[in-house]
Amino acid sequence: MTLIISLVLVLILVIWFPASLRQREKRFYVITGALSLVTFFLTAFRFSAEAYGLPAFIDQVLSVFTKGTLCGALFYVVMLAGALPDRDALRKKVIPCRKQLSILAGFLAMGHGFGYGYRYFPLLLEGMEELRLSVFWACLCSLLLLCLLMPLWVTSFLFIRRKMNPKTWKNIQRAAYVFYALIYLHILLFRFHAVQTGQRDAAISIILYTILFCLYGALRLNRMAVRTQKEYLLLPVQLITICLVALVTGYCVCSVSSASQGKQGQTQGSVAADVSAEKEEGALDVPGEAEAGLSAEESGMQGSFEQEGSSEKEGSAQGSSEKDGFVQGSSGKEGSVQGSSEKDGLGQGSSEKESSAQASSPAGGTSATPAWQDGTYQGSALGYNGKLKVSVTVEDGRITDLTLKSHVEDEPYVSRAVKGVFAAILENNQPEADAVSTATTTSEALVLAVQNALSKSIGQ
Ligand code: HEM
């Protein structure tokens, strides 16, 4: 929906205000530059209106900037105009203000790209296991996008172009084709997991972007075929385009329908049910095996059970928590939920920004509880975008504090998941919880990370 709205906004600008765009270009640049700066901060620090109790539609409006939809629409109109036939009305409107549109798109792309880059690029240095594989490749793609954007954007300014050799300028601008292809690729990769897990909006978005980019590709090849008098290529190009769109659409539709069938077949709140079964088999006693057989695997999730510096009793030297801090700093948010047993003397540690929930914990928990040793333990699991890490505190054999130490998940989903999952775990004193709807993968990962942490508390 935001894509359609963005395209309509750009078309309105191009069709009704081309003259003011050319005559008052500096004013447009200043406004868009300011918007880009705001976009950077909103994206980098995961602003969510919902998390601050503001109306949810604000997030929808902001996502046009933060998620790159508006800059994508601007770039799309620019690239489409170049591929349309010479006599096309839209082409005639766009070509005179193509330079201004590219510069505006570049401004917005920087806000979006540097904003996400601030969150994701440091993880590239941490290694592949910190990110979901598709997200890892998406990040590499995005890095290349930013590298290409810079020369393309700078050389769009007339005063720079005038100082350049026309041939050099043209050669640099040829990189725009690679740039456009990378835009599509990074969207596909970033949203791949969402499509795989059957998210309808992600599937629709991928189908729409595929139609738009295939249409562009077909028009561009048509133009080349006509210019080089190779009209016999027109039919194969059209057929290949239709096949590509059909392939991607088919994959998206199948993913969504198989995911929804899978959900119907499962007992509701699959994490809880499956984890209970697991517990009966005593699998939690063996670190590294706790995840085996979890239904979460069906949605492509794997728990990560690396041992490095992971179990720390309170008061002992902090080995892994230093490492944990690296995303914490970038997100600026932690989720912390504490149990409210009388002994706890609660209130410690939650900053105002943390999403916290109080849970009353009946003594003893719901069922046979494994013998957890007192202490604070670190656990991790693969979330929606990458690894998330939690810290679990056990006092007198009960779970008394849960903190999300670091993550690369998106707001407001992660706040919702932390609230629901941590409160349920504390209330039942069991590492199991129903997945919070709209944040299923993150919820499941939180449960697995808590299990991972607790598995280290057994037999120490
Ligand atoms: C520099 C040029 C870039 C352009 C033109 C661009 C454009 C786009 C577009 C059009 C979308 C799809 C938005 C939608 O769903 O409607 C998108 C999504 C996304 N982009 Fe970029 N992008 C750029 C760079 C980057 C960079 C450097 C990153 C850094 C990691 C990045 C991260 C993302 C992410 C994470 C999404 C998915 C957002 C979501 O749906 O939750 N992009 N981008």
Image (cartoon, rainbow, N blue to C red):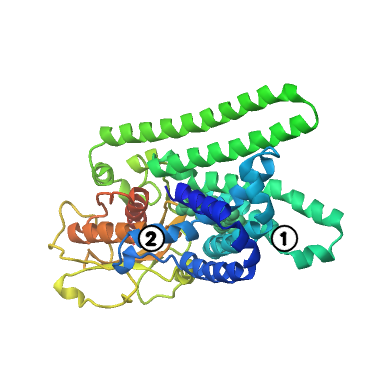
Quarter of the rendered structure image containing ligand 1 = bottom right
Q: Is residue 447 above or below residue 340?
A: above
Residue placed under numbered mark 1 in the picture = 156
Camera-side residue: 21 or 324? 21
Q: Residue at x 16, y 51 (%)?
A: 367
Residue 292 vs 105, above or below: the answer is above
Ligand 1 contact, mark 1 (Cβ < 8 Å): no
Residue 237: image location, x then y, percent:
66, 27
Q: Is residue 227 left or right of residue 262?
A: right
- Determine whether, in the image, residue 13 is placed left or right of residue 422: right
Query: Residue 118: percent from the left, percent from the top?
Result: 55, 65
Of 263 and 175, the residue lying toward us: 175
Q: Which mark is residue 26?
A: none
x 57%, y 48%: residue = 186
Q: Is residue 282 above or below residue 458?
A: above
For badge 1, the amino acid type reads Ser
Q: Secondary structure at mark 2?
A: helix
Query: In terms of sequence position, does the residue under pointer 1 or pointer 2 come before the other?
Result: 2
Residue 125 sits in quarter: bottom right
Q: Quadrant of the C terminus?
A: bottom left
- The answer for how far apart the CA atoms under marks 1 and 2 are is 32 Å
Residue 130 seen in this snapshot: no
Q: Which residue is mark 2?
A: 59
Q: Position of residue 184 (x, y in %)?
A: 58, 45
Element type at mark 1: loop
